[in-house]
C-alpha cells in the first residue's frame, strides 16, 4: 500500500482542548500567571497549550483537578481523550502510527535521519525547517506537536519492546548545528535509560553491513503477526506479504548483530556528548 498524500491532516481537537482549559481556568478565577505554577508548568507552556500549539502532557489533567476541582478534571479528561497523536501527521504515515499504538514490538533501522520516536524538539524543528516545499506556520506547528506526542508511546506502552539501529553518520553530521546535536545526544541517552528501549549505533566502518536497502520499520501486532513499513520522499508502503516481511525481519536481525551493543552505544553517545 502506498500513497503520495503528503499534506498533514490538521484537526481542531488541540484548539478545542486549549479552549476548554482556558474556560476552566477563567471559571476558577486564575490568570495564566497564577495557574501555571500551580500545575507545575511554565506560563509560556500553558499559553501554547491554550492556543492549541502544544500537545498537552497527560499529567496536566490530574494536576488541573488538584487546582480546580473534580468537575474540571472530568471535563478536561474528556477533552484529552478526544485528542489524537496523529494530529498533524502526514496522511501517508497515519496508518503506521495507528499500528505503532497497538504493537507489542517495534523495530526501526534508519540511515537518513534519526527515527521520529527518538527526535527531541530542536531536531524536529531542524528537519521541519528544511521541508520542501516550505510548510506554512500553522501546519509546521502541528507537525512538531504530532512528532513530540508520538513519543508518549514509550510511557504508554511499558510492555512493548522498542529497538532502534541508527547510523553513526547521523550523529557525526551535526545536523542543525552544535546545539541541536547536543540536544539530540542528551535525548538519546535519556531514552536509552528506559527499560523498554534499546538503541544501537552502527559504526562508521562496518564491512559486513546489511542496511544497503535503506531505512525500515517492523511491528509485531498483538496477535503476533509482523508488518513492515518503509517511507521516503513523501510516499510510503505498508508491507504485509509474509515472505517480504520475513526478509525484512532477517535483515534487521543481521543489522542488530553488526551494530554496537546498547552498552557500547551508551558509551559512544557519552563520548560524543562530552566532545561537543
Image (cartoon, grey):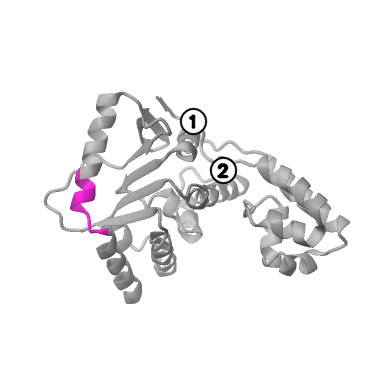
Residue 114, position in %: x, y? 37, 53
Q: Is residue 211 visible?
A: no
Q: Nearer the viewer, mark 2 or mark 1?
A: 2
Q: Please, is residue 75 above or below residue 7 in the view?
A: below
Disc with the residue nearer the chain's start (2 vs 1): 1
Residue extent of the magenta highlight:
254-261
Is 111 part of what is drawn in magenta? no
Q: Is residue 4 above or below residue 39?
A: above
**What is the quadrant of residue 221 in the picture?**
top left
Q: Position of residue 156 (x, y in %)?
A: 52, 48
- Kindly identify which residue carries mark 2: 85
Q: Which numbered marker is on residue 56?
A: none
Name the foreground residue: 250 vs 9: 250
Dominant secondary structure, magenta:
helix
Neighbour tally class for label 2: few under 14, some 14-19, many 20 plus, Cα within 10 Å: many
Task: Write down the residue under mark 1.
Answer: 5
Label 1: few (<14), some (14–19) or many (≥20) C-alpha neighbours in 10 Å: some
Q: Is residue 263 visible?
A: yes
Eyeballing the image, is 49 above or below 160? below
Amino acid at each position: 500500500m502506498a500513497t503520495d498524500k503528503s499534506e498533514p491532516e490538521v484537526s481542531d481537537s488541540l484548539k478545542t482542548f486549549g479552549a476548554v482549559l482556558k474556560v476552566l481556568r477563567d471559571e476558577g478565577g486564575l490568570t495564566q500567571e497564577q495557574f501555571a505554577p500551580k500545575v507545575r508548568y511554565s506560563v509560556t507552556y500553558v499559553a501554547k497549550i491554550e492556543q492549541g500549539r502544544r500537545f498537552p502532557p497527560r499529567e496536566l489533567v490530574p494536576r488541573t483537578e488538584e487546582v480546580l476541582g473534580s468537575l474540571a478534571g472530568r471535563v478536561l479528561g474528556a477533552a484529552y481523550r478526544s485528542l489524537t497523536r496523529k494530529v498533524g501527521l502526514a496522511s501517508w504515515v497515519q496508518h503506521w502510527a495507528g499500528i505503532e499504538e497497538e504493537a507489542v514490538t517495534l523495530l526501526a533501522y534508519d540511515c537518513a535521519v534519526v527515527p521520529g520516536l527518538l527526535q527531541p524538539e530542536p531536531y524536529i524543528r531542524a528537519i521541519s525547517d528544511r521541508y520542501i516545499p516550505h510548510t506554512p506556520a500553522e501546519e509546521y506547528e502541528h507537525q512538531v506537536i504530532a512528532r513530540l506526542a508520538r513519543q508518549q508511546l514509550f510511557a504508554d506502552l511499558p510492555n512493548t519492546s522498542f529497538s532502534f539501529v541508527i547510523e553513526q553518520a547521523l550523529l557525526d553530521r551535526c545536523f542543525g548545528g552544535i546545539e541541536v546535536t547536543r540536544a539530540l545526544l542528551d535525548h538519546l541517552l535519556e531514552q536509552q535509560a528506559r527499560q523498554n528501549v534499546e538503541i544501537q549505533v552502527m559504526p562508521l566502518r562496518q564491512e559486513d553491513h546489511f542496511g544497503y536497502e535503506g531505512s525500515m520499520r517492523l511491528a509485531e501486532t498483538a496477535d503476533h503477526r509482523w508488518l513492515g513499513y518503509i517511507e521516503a520522499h513523501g510516499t510510503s508502503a505498508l508491507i504485509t506479504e509474509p515472505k517480504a516481511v520475513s526478509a525484512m525481519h532477517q535483515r534487521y536481525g543481521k543489522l542488530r548483530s553488526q551494530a554496537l551493543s546498547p552498552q557500547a552505544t551508551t558509551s559512544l553517545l557519552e563520548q560524543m556528548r562530552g566532545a561537543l
